[in-house]
Image (tube, coloured by chain):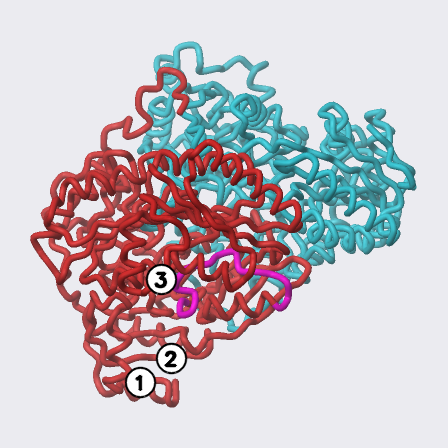
Chain colours: A cyan, B red
C-alpha cells in the first residue's frame, strides 16, 4: 500500500382521508396515527403475542420426513443455531427445520402448512439485523440453504438466474471467472443468500454505482403461501406487459411469498479497481469531498463510505486492525472501478490533489493490489463485527438527506450523555444512509428508553426513513408509521391479505401489530 | 450461455393450481390459458364492449365547471385532439376534458367520478403507441397538462420532485442549467409528461446507462380511484420500511391511480459527450461490435442503438435526411458520456480502431459538437415519424434475448412476402429491445391477420416479451398471456380490485378482457 507523498420537505398537502378499507381492522387501541413527519407510532409493546396458529404434531413431522428424507431436522443442537439471529438478540423456539432442494418441495411444504395453519419462518443465510430471519415462537424454519444451484448465465446479456439459496460470495466467485460481478456487495457476503438479499432489498456497498435490486433484479420465482408457484423469472432487461409483480416480493421480508429463484443483471468485471482511505477533520469537509468526487471521478466512482473516529477505535481495540493513516475525526473509503487503469489512476490522482490542496482531506493512502484493497475495505466492512465485541448493541439504519447524516450522531451523543458506552456512526454517504450504533455493557432498558422513540422522532422530523436497507423485521415493525403514511401501511395489509390470507408467512415481521 | 446443472427447464415446472381467488372471475369463454411459452391468448376480439359506467349528465358538467373554472372543456375542437392518439389509430368519443392544476383538484375529480360511476381516461402528453392514453368510449379525459411545476430540486443528492405534467424536455432544460440531466430520454421528449413516462415505465435511449424508472423513481404521489391521496414522495435514495407500493403504479398505465407528482434521481450532466454513427455488413457483426463496446467503452457507454437499411431509406425518402456514411445493411448509434473528454476520446478512438481493423464496422463518423450530435441522433429518433409518412403502420415493441433481435425481422419478411409495403427493424440493442414496424398503404385486415398472432407466437417461443417498453394499452391488452403466466395476470386483477373496485380508471386498458 503506497502511502502518497505529501498526503499528510417534502410536502403533505392534504388532510388524512377516512380509514382505508374494511379489509384492515385495527385491533390495538392504537394512538391516533397521523403518518410521516408526525412521529406517532402505534404498538409500543414490541413483544408480540403468539397468533392462533396450529402446533406441530407427530403427523406433521412424519409428513415432512417423508417429503424431505433426511432434510426435516428436529435435532435441538442444529435448531439452536437457526433459532438465534446473528446478533444473538432474538431467540425463537422452533422445533422443526426444513431444508428443501427444489421449488416443488417448497411448494408442497407451503401447501401443507397453509392447510394445517402452521406458521413458517423463511430463512436464508440468517445474517439479518432486525430479527426478521428467525422464528419468534414455534414457526417452522424453511431454509434455502440447499437451494444453491446456478441455473443459467448468459455471457452476452450478463443475466444470471440461480436458486435463492446461493451464497452471495459464491455467486461473485462464479461470475468473476466469467469476467462479470454481482451488482451488490455487502459485509455479510460470505453467508448471506441471494434470495434473502432480494427478500430484504439489501443495499450494500455498490448501490451508488449499480443501483438497487429494484432495477437489477429482472425476475423472480416465488412460492405463494398456499403453494402455488408464481414464475416471473426472466432473461430480459425490459418487460412492460402489465404490473411488475416481482417488485412486491423485493423487500417484503418473506411475508408475501418464499423466493425460490432470482434473475439478476450483472455488470462486467471492471478492469481496474482502486481504493483510497482518507481522513477529514470535519463532516462538512467529508461532504464537500463527496461532492468533489462526484464531479471529478464521475462514472468510475463505485463507493463512497465513511466511518467516524469512534468506529476506528473499536476496530483497533476489538479486532486489532491498524489505522493506515493519521488519526482523524472522520474516515472515507472511496472505490473507483473502470475499464482503463491509466485513465482511472489519472482521475483519482487529480481528485486527490484537489482535495488535499484545498485541505478537505488531511491524510490518505491508496491501494490498487487486491490484498491491499481488501485490507482497506475491511476497515469499513468489519465495523459490525467489532461492535459485537463491544457489548450489547442497539442498531439503527437510517436514511437521511445526505447533509444531515452526522447531525443525528452528534445529537444522539449529546442526548445520551454518559448513559451509553459508545455511540458510533458509519455508512453509505453516497446513498444518504447512516448506520448509527449505540453500545452498552449489557441489555439496558433505561438506555433503550432514552434512545427510542428519540431516534425515530428525529428521523421523522427530517422526512428520513427509519430503515434504509435493513428492513423492519421483528424489531422495527411497529415503528413503520414514522416513515410511511397510514394509507400506505393499510394498503400493505390489503396486499398481505390477498397473498397470504391465513398469515402463515413470517408472522410478527414487517407489518405492524395493529394490522392483525 | 453457460447452462449449468441438470435443471431441465426454468419455466413452468408445476401444473396449474386452481383458480386464483374469487375476486377475479373469467366471464369470457376463454380458451385454456397455459401462460408463457405456449402461445395461447384469450379474447381474440380486440374491440371491447362499453362497460356499464354512467353517462355524463348536465349536473356533472356543472360540478366540474364549478370546481375547475375555465378548465372543464367541452369544446368539440379541443376534444378532437385529445380523443385521438398520436398515431391517429385510436379514436375516442369523450365529451369532457378536465385540466386540474393541483393534487387536491385531481382528488375531488376522482372522488366525484367514483361516486357517480363515471369512467376516467388519464392523459399526459398523449404520445403513447398502444392506444393507452385516449378514451375508448366516452370516458372523461383527465389531463395533467396544467400540473407542470417543479416542486424541489436538491443539488447535493440530485433528487428532483415535480408535478406529473412536466414535459420531459422542459425538465431536461431546467436540470441542464444546474449541471444535471434526466435519467431518461426519448424521441417524444418534446411532448411527453414525466407522469406519463412513469405510468408507462418508459424506457428510451439512456436505459443502458442509468437503468429503468424502477430504480430511478424514488417516490410518487398518487390519487387513488376514490380520491384518496397516497403520498409516497421521497427525497431519499433508500427506504426499506415495508412494501415498495410506488412500484405498483410504475407501468400500470393509469389503471391503478393517477400519478400527480414524481421524485426522481437525476445523474450529473456529463462533461463530455460523443456520438458515433457506424455501418455494419451483418447483424452478427453488429452484435460483436456491441460486445466489444461494452468491454472497451465500459462505464462511458451511454447508448447503443441500431437501425436497418430499410429505416434509412424511409428517413431519406420521407424526411429528406442524409445518410452520413456509405450505404450499409445495418447502422449503429453509439453514445459515450463521461467526466473527462480526453479519456473518453481516447477510449472511443481505440474502440473504433479495433472494430474497423477487425472489419466488424465498415464505415463511420463521429460527432462531438452538440448540433452534429443532434443530427446523428435524429437518424435514430425520427424513424417513428418517417414511418407515419409511409402509410398505416403496424407497430411491435418486442423484448428478446439480444442475439435473437434481428432474426424476428428476417422471419417476418419471409413470412409476409409481398403482403407488406415495408418491414423495418430498429431499437435498443443494449436492452434487447426491437421495434418491429410493418407498413401498408392503408389499414389492411388481411395483413394484420398475417402478422398476428405470428409475431406473438414467435416472441413467446423464445420467452420474449410482447411489450418491452410501450405497455399494453388498448391494443395489446389481450395478448398479455403470451408473456405473463395466468397466475400473474389473475394477481393483477386482484390488485386492480383492491385499488379501483369500480374499475373507473382507464378501463379497457392493460388488463385483458377476460378479467372483467
In the image, which disc is placed on residue B56? none
**Whether marks 2 and 1 lie on the same chain:** yes
**Mark 2 or 1 closer to N-term?**
1
Label 2 residue SS: loop
Q: Is residue B185 magenta?
A: yes
In the rendering, at what x and y percent does residue B131 appear? 25, 62
Region rendered in magenta: B177-192
Q: CA separation, marks 2 and 3?
A: 38 Å
Indicate whether A93 appears above or below A238: above
Secondary structure at badge 1 equals strand
- Residue B155 covered by magenta stretch: no
Foreground residue among A106 and A352: A352
Q: Are marks 2 and 3 on the same chain?
A: yes
Q: Residue at x 16, y 54 (%)?
A: B421
Q: Is residue B25 left or right of residue B247?
A: left
Q: Residues within 10 Å of mark 1 (few under 14, many from 20)?
A: some
Residue mark closest to the camera, 1 vs 3: 3
Above or below for B492 versus B100: above
**Quarter occupied by the N terminus of chain B:** top left
* Main secondary structure along the magenta-highlighted residues: loop
Of B440 and A456, nearer the camera is: B440
Relative depth, front residue between A43 and B270: B270
Cβ–Cβ under 8 Å for marks 2 and 3? no
Q: Chain of mark 2?
A: B
Residue occupied by mark 3: B321
Lower position in the chain sequence, tag 2 or tag 3: 2
Which residue is at the front of the view, B96 or B344? Answer: B344
Pointer 2 residue = B99
Q: In this figure, which residue is indicated by the disc labeled 1? A: B73
- Give the vertical position of B393 relative to A232 (above or below): below
Amino acid at each position: 500500500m503506497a502511502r502518497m507523498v505529501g498526503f499528510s420537505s417534502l410536502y403533505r398537502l392534504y388532510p388524512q382521508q377516512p380509514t382505508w378499507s374494511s379489509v384492515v381492522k385495527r385491533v390495538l387501541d392504537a394512538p391516533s396515527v397521523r403518518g410521516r413527519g408526525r412521529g406517532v407510532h402505534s404498538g409500543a409493546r414490541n413483544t408480540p403475542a403468539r397468533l392462533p396458529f396450529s402446533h406441530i404434531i407427530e403427523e406433521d413431522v412424519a409428513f415432512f420426513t417423508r417429503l424431505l428424507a433426511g432434510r426435516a431436522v428436529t435435532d435441538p443442537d442444529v435448531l439452536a443455531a437457526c433459532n438465534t439471529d446473528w446478533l444473538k438478540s432474538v431467540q425463537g423456539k422452533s422445533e422443526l427445520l426444513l431444508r428443501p432442494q427444489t421449488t416443488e418441495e417448497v411448494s408442497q411444504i407451503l401447501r401443507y402448512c397453509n392447510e394445517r395453519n402452521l406458521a413458517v419462518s423463511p430463512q436464508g443465510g440468517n445474517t439479518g439485523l432486525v430479527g426478521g430471519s428467525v422464528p419468534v415462537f414455534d414457526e417452522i424454519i424453511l431454509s434455502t440453504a440447499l437451494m444453491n444451484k446456478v441455473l443459467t448465465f448468459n455471457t452476452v446479456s450478463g443475466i444470471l438466474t440461480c436458486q435463492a439459496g446461493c451464497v452471495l460470495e459464491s455467486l461473485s466467485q462464479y461470475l468473476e471467472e466469467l469476467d462479470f460481478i454481482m451488482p451488490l456487495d455487502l459485509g455479510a457476503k460470505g453467508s448471506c443468500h441471494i434470495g434473502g438479499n432480494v427478500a430484504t432489498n439489501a443495499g450494500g456497498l455498490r448501490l451508488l454505482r449499480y443501483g438497487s435490486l429494484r432495477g437489477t433484479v429482472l425476475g423472480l420465482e416465488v412460492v405463494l403461501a398456499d403453494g402455488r408457484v408464481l414464475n416471473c423469472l426472466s432473461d430480459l432487461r425490459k418487460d412492460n406487459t402489465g404490473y411488475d409483480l416481482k417488485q412486491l416480493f423485493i423487500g417484503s421480508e418473506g411475508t408475501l411469498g418464499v423466493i425460490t429463484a432470482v434473475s439478476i443483471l450483472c455488470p462486467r468485471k471492471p478492469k481496474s479497481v482502486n481504493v483510497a482511505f482518507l481522513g477529514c477533520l470535519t463532516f462538512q469537509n467529508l461532504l464537500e469531498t463527496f461532492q468533489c468526487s462526484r464531479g471529478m471521478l464521475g462514472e468510475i466512482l463505485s463507493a463512497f463510505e465513511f466511518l467516524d473516529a469512534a468506529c476506528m477505535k473499536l476496530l483497533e481495540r476489538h479486532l486489532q486492525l491498524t489505522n493506515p493513516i493519521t488519526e482523524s475525526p472522520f474516515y472515507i473509503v472511496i472505490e473507483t472501478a473502470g475499464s482503463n487503469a491509466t485513465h482511472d489512476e489519472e482521475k483519482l490522482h487529480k481528485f486527490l490533489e484537489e482535495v488535499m490542496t484545498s485541505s478537505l482531506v488531511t491524510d490518505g493512502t491508496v491501494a490498487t493490489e487486491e490484498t491491499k484493497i481488501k485490507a482497506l475495505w475491511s476497515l469499513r466492512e468489519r465495523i459490525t463485527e467489532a461492535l459485537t465485541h463491544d457489548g450489547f448493541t442497539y442498531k439503527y439504519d437510517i436514511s437521511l438527506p445526505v447533509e444531515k447524516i452526522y447531525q443525528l450522531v452528534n445529537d444522539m451523543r449529546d442526548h445520551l450523555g454518559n448513559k451509553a458506552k459508545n455511540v458510533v456512526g458509519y455508512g453509505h454517504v453516497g446513498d444518504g444512509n447512516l448506520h448509527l450504533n449505540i453500545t452498552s455493557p449489557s441489555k439496558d432498558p433505561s438506555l433503550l428508553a432514552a434512545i427510542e422513540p428519540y431516534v425515530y422522532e428525529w428521523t421523522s422530523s427530517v422526512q428520513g426513513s427509519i430503515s434504509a436497507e435493513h428492513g423492519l423485521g421483528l424489531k422495527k415493525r411497529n415503528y413503520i408509521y414514522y416513515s410511511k403514511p397510514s394509507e400506505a401501511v393499510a394498503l400493505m395489509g390489503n396486499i398481505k391479505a390477498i397473498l397470504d390470507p391465513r398469515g402463515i408467512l413470517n408472522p410478527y415481521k414487517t407489518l405492524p401489530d395493529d394490522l392483525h
